[in-house]
Image (tube, helix red, strand yellow):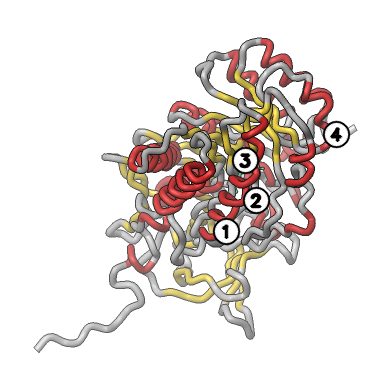
Amino acid sequence: MAKKKIKKPGKNWRKFWKLGVDEWNTQFFNVSKDGELTVTEGHHIYNLHDIASKYGTPLQVIFPFILEDRLKDLIGYFQAYMKIYGYKGKFFYHYPMKVNQNKEFILPLLSEGANLEVTSANELWLVKKLWEGEKFNSKIRVLCNGPKTESYLDLIEELRGKGMNIVPIIEGPEEIERLLKYRGDIGLRVDLNIKADTHWDKKFDRFGLSEKDILDLGKMKNLKILHYHMGSQIKTQKSIFEGVKRAFGLYAQLQKTHPNLDTLDIGGGFGIPYEKKKFYTAKGVSSKIIKILKNLSDKAGIRHPNLVVEWGQYIVAPAEITIYKVLSEKIIPKANAKSWYVVDGSFMNDLKDTWAIHQKWHVIPANNMHGVLKTTWLAGSTCDSDDKYTAGGNYILLPKLHANQEQFVAVLDTGAYQDGLSSHHCLLSSPMKIVASDGMIKIARKRETADSIGKMFGWTNGIH
Ligand SMILES: *Cc1c(COP(=O)(O)O)cnc(C)c1O
């Protein structure tokens, strides 16, 4: 008779680490037979342990194929449901640049059919560079949000003059006068009078005009787009649908007096299942949005609006991971976790939302994935006691450390927002950036040296 097997936490380690699951955006991730983390792009397999050993840590790995795959699917869902339901409007995806401005993100998205949304003159300046380099086709439309400084407005005018399809979105009463003189299409941002289910506290919302203010505005002959943005990482799909319904009501009213208004822009906010728990899906939500808009417009007797979606985090978060190495271990006497693992990067610097909004991450080992596990908390290597990740005071399961073996830790879904927010507390170097594409690794940005960081703080020609 066979002996009963000792039950280990993850006989199926892929399942144990929640990899290979579409709904959690881990479908490309797997565990090798040696217990190492891999990512599969078509016929190519990247071994993240080998890569981290070779290039060193902290390390950001960008996977453009994941971006392309996600955007292609998203556009596909909306277009398919428009066809299925007999929806007459068109679908446009606009990538909100602020979510990740790295070239390695923007270029693949543009080639996959993204339009753009920018929030500042400096982001728009990058778009101008792309335009001048003929990196994008002239059909791409650029929506301009954010406070309109003089230099921002001048750049918008300049690019329109050069033939770019560029649409400023009015965000506040002070912008109306100047933008009414704008010779191209314009948009209006409404601050919807509903509370979305996000981290964003509605009481302090300062973006957009109120519904009433918009209705009081009178006629704007070049009004093309009605836009709203309810906040990021919306927790429930119900909240997304409520926004669409509420905004449609205003759209329908405005449409009567503004025949050029033909587009509803529902902004960003679609969430990511960072914690690998049950979550709503893009397929389900896109279907429902089209259904809602079709029914409401038919009822109101108006044309089906063109639809703009600006889901940024949804598209880019899963396309990058961050890898650290464990430097040392420190026992915690009495807590939910047994040990601190001190890593060679910084949560405060590199993954700022850990500190700022208590972001939860899916943290897994990049090697020893079959190993004996331990409950840990992670500490960054700044001297700051807030530089830590404790999974909300709970614990992170990671392999026990071995004396002569390095332990690497991978943080998944780090592609959204963290780079723009990153900083240099204690003058630590930011992670090196590499790109994994077509089976090859390219260094996108070398690791910062002490000298290059010093320069940011004015230490140019040595110390005088
Ligand atoms: C930040 C922002 C987005 C992107 O939000 P996500 O939560 O990343 O989808 C889209 N539109 C506007 C106007 C934004 O400010």
Q: Which label sits in the foreground, 3 or 1?
A: 3
Q: Where is residue 233 in the image (x, y as percent from the top left)?
A: 58, 55
Image height check: is 223 above or below 433? above
**Residue 42 is drawn in which quadrant?**
top left
In the structure shown, which secondary structural element does the residue marked by tag 4 occupy?
Answer: helix
Do the CB atoms of the residues marked 2 and 1 lie less than 8 Å apart?
A: yes
Quarter holding the C terminus? Answer: top right
Q: Which of 77 and 30 is in front in this view?
A: 77
What crowding class fits label 3: few (fewer than 14 Cα within 10 Å), some (14-19), or many (20 or more)?
Answer: many
Do the CB atoms of the residues marked 3 and 2 lie less than 8 Å apart?
A: no
Q: In which quarter of the image is ligand 1?
A: top right
In the structure shown, which secondary structural element does the residue marked by tag 3 occupy?
Answer: helix
Sequence order check, earlier mark of 2 and 1: 2
Relative to 198, is 282 on the left or the right? left
- Alpha carbon of mark 2 to alpha carbon of mark 1: how far? 9 Å
**Residue 215 is drawn in which quadrant?**
top right
Q: Residue 72 carries which label?
A: none
Question: Label 2: which residue?
Answer: 230
Q: Position of residue 17 (x, y in %)?
A: 39, 65
Three-letter amino acid code of the residue under disc 3: Tyr
Question: Label 4: which residue?
Answer: 174
Relative to 37, is 120 on the left or the right? right
In the structure shown, which secondary structural element does the residue marked by tag 2 occupy?
Answer: loop
- Alpha carbon of mark 2 to alpha carbon of mark 4: how far? 21 Å
Do the CB atoms of the residues marked 4 and 3 lie less than 8 Å apart?
A: no
- Alpha carbon of mark 4 to alpha carbon of mark 3: how far? 22 Å
Question: Label 3: which residue?
Answer: 251
